[in-house]
Image: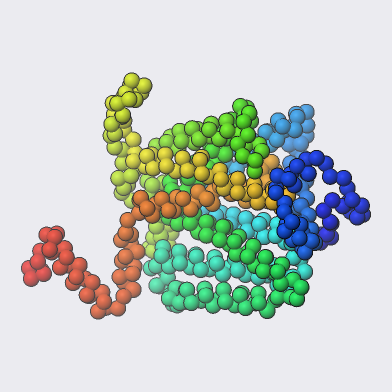
């Protein structure tokens, strides 16, 4: 990447180029203030990241006779089908591949956001900053995923001496690693660039909060059962597609200024389509153990297993239909999986609140006058452009499971019990036996 810096509104030769009305109106829409102008002056101007037509040449030739509007529709449609196909393939390949893909997406999203910071604030000459940004990413991933490995691979960790030591002192090691990066940042401070360096320090940490934390929650959702991973992600994808389709064909009323192409027609059409899609997808997936069982690690085979007796969430139940709907549906009762009721909450969030993740990303891009986070996917932009709503959805699903679904995990309790000293284990054993005897589940300790 060239590091030549162009002042806003000037051509390569330094001559000022006339600004059109559209750019002037966008400046007014962005609400630029005096402090913004001062920041631009300090940082040398915030040149927009250049964009180019990244559509594959074969599609350009095939769609050359279409208008730009319909060309964009076909490009987005073809690439969307390709991404959905890829999504099905990685689901088929299993949990390990899914977790690997989540990690790759996390790294790419971090790279896209950090690159925007480098471009906007011209931080190429700041010592160590590229290195420190990736170092902090490594530290945060070590902290989060070290906890996950200890929770879900406890037996494997206990078998290996190095892993057992790393697990025991995991938080201290994580803190030491972060403290090292913090000291390196302080030592890298350069006179006349203090404010810029602290801006980028904050930029890096906010990016880590958004990207790493959310991807960690996605993997936690996956371990609860692949259905908790697939249904929420699919609902967001469905809402994105159907909102675009309804907006493209029927859209007339603008929804929000941050995204001028978004319409109320697309928003409402996407909502009803997503709720219906969530109900149908949940019904299909609830009948398969490979989707509903928690993902567990089998220590004997050193592989993941998804076999269990389905919980009540995934067993058909009979529900009474409200009296007001008897004449409409013609049914008095309906058989459905309890998970389908939860899917209504998931799909509602995906279609009503999830888009605000996209609006947030749109506001971010307009603030820095860029069209997309990157040009990785033709017609769609960067990876972050596709996952801006997914990260918000991941947090909701994790909170929803913790609040309404998940109870104490016997496996984790047993792991903690086995890690205690023998006298502590014996005390807990006697206490538990006495408690069960009082409830009549076991005979009295004297009988035993």
The correct choice, above or below, for 343 with respect to 404 in the image is: above
Q: From the image, which quarter does the N terminus lie in? A: bottom right
Instruction: Estimate the x, y position of residue 446 in percent, counting from the top left.
Output: 7, 71
Residue 138 falls left or right of residue 424: right
Tell me which corner region of the image, top left, top right, bottom left or bottom right, holds residue 78. top right
Q: Is residue 183 above or below residue 129?
A: below
Residue 341 appears in the rendering: yes
| x then y, percent, for residue 74 | 68, 33
Q: How many numbered circles are shown?
A: 0
Q: How is the image coloured?
A: rainbow
Instruction: Please report the residue visible at 70 percent of the width from the left and 30 percent of the height from the top.
Output: 70
Q: Quadrant of residue 106?
A: bottom right
Screen quadrant of the C terminus: bottom left
| Residue 196 place in picture, x, y as percent | 71, 67
4 with respect to 71 (left or right): right
- Residue at 73% x, 36% y is 59
Residue 122 x/y as whole percent: 76, 63
| Residue sitting nearer the eye, 267 or 172 | 267
| Residue in view at x 53 percent, y 42 percent | 236
In the visual, does 9 lie left or right of 329? right
* Residue, far left: 447
Q: Residue at x 62, y 70 (%)?
A: 135
As drawn, 420 above or below 22: below
Q: Is residue 294 visible?
A: no
């Amino acid at each position: 990447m060239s590091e030549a810096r162009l002042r806003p509104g000037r051509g390569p030769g330094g001559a000022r180029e006339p600004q059109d009305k559209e750019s002037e109106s966008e400046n007014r829409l962005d609400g630029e203030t005096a402090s913004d102008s001062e920041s631009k002056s300090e940082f040398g101007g915030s040149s927009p990241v250049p964009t180019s037509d990244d559509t594959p040449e074969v599609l350009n030739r095939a769609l050359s006779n279409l208008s730009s509007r319909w060309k964009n529709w076909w490009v987005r449609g073809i690439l969307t089908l390709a991404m959905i196909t890829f999504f099905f393939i990685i689901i088929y390949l299993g949990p390990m591949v899914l977790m690997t893909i989540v990690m790759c997406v996390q790294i790419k999203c971090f790279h896209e956001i950090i690159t925007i910071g480098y471009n906007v604030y011209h931080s190429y000459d700041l010592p160590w900053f590229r290195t420190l940004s990736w170092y902090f990413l490594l530290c945060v991933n070590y902290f989060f995923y070290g906890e996950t490995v200890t929770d879900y691979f406890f037996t494997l960790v206990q078998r290996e001496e190095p892993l057992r030591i790393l697990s025991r002192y995991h938080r201290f090691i994580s803190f030491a690693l972060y403290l090292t990066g913090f000291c390196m940042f302080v030592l890298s401070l350069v006179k006349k660039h203090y404010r810029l360096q602290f801006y980028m320090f904050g930029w890096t940490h906010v990016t880590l909060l958004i990207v790493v934390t959310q991807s960690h929650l996605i993997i936690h959702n996956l371990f609860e059962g692949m259905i908790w991973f697939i249904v929420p992600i699919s609902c967001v994808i469905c809402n994105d597609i159907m909102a675009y389709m309804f907006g493209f064909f029927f859209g007339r009323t603008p929804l929000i200024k941050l995204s001028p192409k978004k319409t109320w027609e697309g928003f409402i059409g996407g909502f009803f389509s997503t709720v219906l899609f969530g109900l149908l997808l949940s019904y299909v997936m609830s009948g398969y153990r490979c989707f509903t069982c928690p993902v567990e690690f089998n220590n004997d085979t050193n592989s993941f297993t998804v076999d269990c007796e389905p919980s009540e969430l995934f067993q058909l139940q009979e529900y009474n239909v409200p009296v007001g709907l008897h004449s409409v549906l013609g049914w008095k009762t309906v058989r459905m999986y309890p998970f389908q009721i939860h899917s209504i909450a998931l799909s509602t969030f995906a279609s009503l609140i999830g888009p605000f993740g996209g609006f947030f990303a749109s506001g971010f891009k307009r603030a820095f006058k860029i069209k997309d986070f990157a040009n990785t996917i033709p017609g769609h932009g960067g990876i972050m452009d596709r996952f801006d709503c997914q990260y918000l959805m991941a947090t909701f699903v994790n909170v929803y499971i913790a609040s309404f679904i998940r109870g104490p995990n016997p496996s984790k309790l047993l792991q903690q019990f086995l890690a205690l000293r023998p006298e502590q284990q014996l005390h807990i054993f006697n206490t538990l036996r006495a408690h069960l005897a009082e409830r009549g589940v076991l005979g009295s300790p004297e009988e035993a």
